Image (cartoon, grey):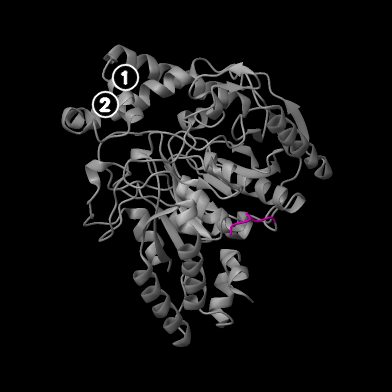
Amino acid sequence: MNSNDICYLSAYEMREKIKTQELTSLQITEAIIERIEKFNDKINAYCTPTFDIAREIAKQADKAVKQGKDLPPLHGIPTSIKDLVLTKGIRTTFGCVLYESNVPEVDEVVIERLKNAGMVLLGKTNTPAFGHQAVTDNPIFGKTRNPWNIERTSGGSSGGAGASVASGMGPLALGSDGGGSIRIPSSFCGVYGLKPSYGRIPHYPSAGIKWTGLDHYGPIVRYVKDAALMLDVMAGPFAGDRHSLPKTNITYFDIVDIKPKNLKIGYSFDLGFIKAVDPEVEKAVMDSVQKFDEFGWQQEKIKMKLKRPEMTFNTLVTAGLAHDLEAYLEEWQEKMSPNLVRMVQAGLTYSAVDLERAMYQRKLIHEEIFKQFQKYDVLITPSTAVYPFELGKMFPSKIAGKRASPVAWMSFTFPFNLTGNPAASIPCGWSSEGTPIGMQIVGKQFDEETVLQVSKTFEELQPWQEKKPDLK
């Protein structure tokens, strides 16, 4: 098996080969490090590599195998961490000059769980400052490029994570999603990303209130089973996070291959408020939905109306950023991302009544989605209204020839941060430019099981992993 083939193995295959020592963790880790050193300058997925740490963990992993020790679920598997997550002893910048030299003294609980599960830490992946935008660019590390076309954006805010997995620079990546930040780069980079139910993966410790009530940690991978493998490790309650969910009696990896019976799918290309979708995106998603005919699953176009989700989302996000960053604005705004500064300034204009109004609208949105799930088992939409656009743009000004707001292109994702439903993006087609198109699969509250099973079923119907970016 050559080095490139090793880099594109699934994590669950790596796990079995490490157990038998057909491939050692160190061999796998060295192959991926070699690929990162070859291509990261072109893509800019990793901002803080930790190769020496990775090699040492890999050596210890192989030693444990030879000693016959019990092996944890991610034993010896290379993994990357988004640069918004606290990692003890490793620079964590949050993509902002305020924290350019920050080295945390603690791990977040999700990192502790990944370490205990045996991951080999490859490094931190690039993100915009505090994940404030859905393209990946910041004043410290610059732009992350799309592996399928380096003149296109990788999306964001887990853009480094999505680009790393798509380009074979690691099988597992930890991302975070406050408005689409796992699903958007997964869609743009042609990989699988899962935003679990809110609270499924705990957050602790975390600074400030930005993204409070919206942010989810989750896996970005090439294979659906790898997402299940990673979720098993990260999920579960933690007393320090009052929103964390109780442990389920499900092992996601064990149930992911089960095909649901008598499923009813609702699909939508507007969610009752989205004004335009690129025709190529709509066709790819519609063609994909129809593939479920093979299993006799019912499909029906949804009739619904979400009220003012854009206003609700913008109010909550910008107010949170304003709360956390107002004190730094005067001294640091010249060195901060201009878009982040504008968002903080917008957040400072809201009153307490404005915030309560946004919270009320959020309640109404949640109730409308809940009603839909009385009729359907899953909801399917495009992951994004467009396929990857030009590097350096914040957003497309037009969609399908119609003028678009700054968040119109990502309007399929953020409503499900407001509700907390589990949602995934899975590759479902290719644009005329040869870039990926993603389909969003949304589940009932707390029902990652069905999202993963539908995703795995679609992966079998329309696998995508054999197609790889042409990096030279």
- Residue 88 is situated, as x and y percent measured from the top left of the image, at 27, 59
Disc 2 to disc 1, how far (Cα)? 8 Å
Which residue is at 39% across, 18% downward? 358
Which element type, helix, strand or loop, lies under badge 1? helix
**457 shown above or below 308:** below
Q: Is residue 470 magenta?
A: yes
Magenta highlight on residue 53: no
- The quarter of the picture where residue 55 lies is bottom left
Relative height, residue 278 to residue 24 (above, below): above
Q: Quadrant of the N terminus?
A: bottom right
Q: Main secondary structure of the magenta part?
A: loop
One can see residue 250 in this view = no
Q: Are marks 2 and 1 in contact (CB under 8 Å)?
A: yes
Query: What segment carries the magenta color?
Result: 467-472
Crowding at dot 1, Cα within 10 Å, few <14 / some 14-19 / many 20+, comes out as some
Locate residue 106 relative to residue 78 in the image: left or right. Answer: left
Q: What kind of element bears circle 2? A: helix
x, y percent for residue 456: 67, 51
In the image: residue 25, left or right of residue 123: right
Please say if 405 is above or below 47.
above
Q: Which residue is mark 2?
A: 322
The type of residue carrying mark 2 is Ala
Residue, x 46% and y 37% (percent of image)? 135
Q: Which quadrant does the C terminus fall into?
A: bottom right
- Mark 2 surroundings within 10 Å by alpha-carbon count, few (fewer than 14), some (14 through 19), many (20 or more): many
Q: Could you say which disc has been placed on residue 71 in the image?
A: none
Taking the spot 76% from the left edge, 40% from the top edge, the residue there is 262
Q: Which residue is mark 1?
A: 346
Q: What residue sits 47% from the left and 45% below the top?
A: 159
Q: Earlier in the sequence, mark 2 or mark 1?
A: 2
Report which quarter residue 441 is drawn in: top right
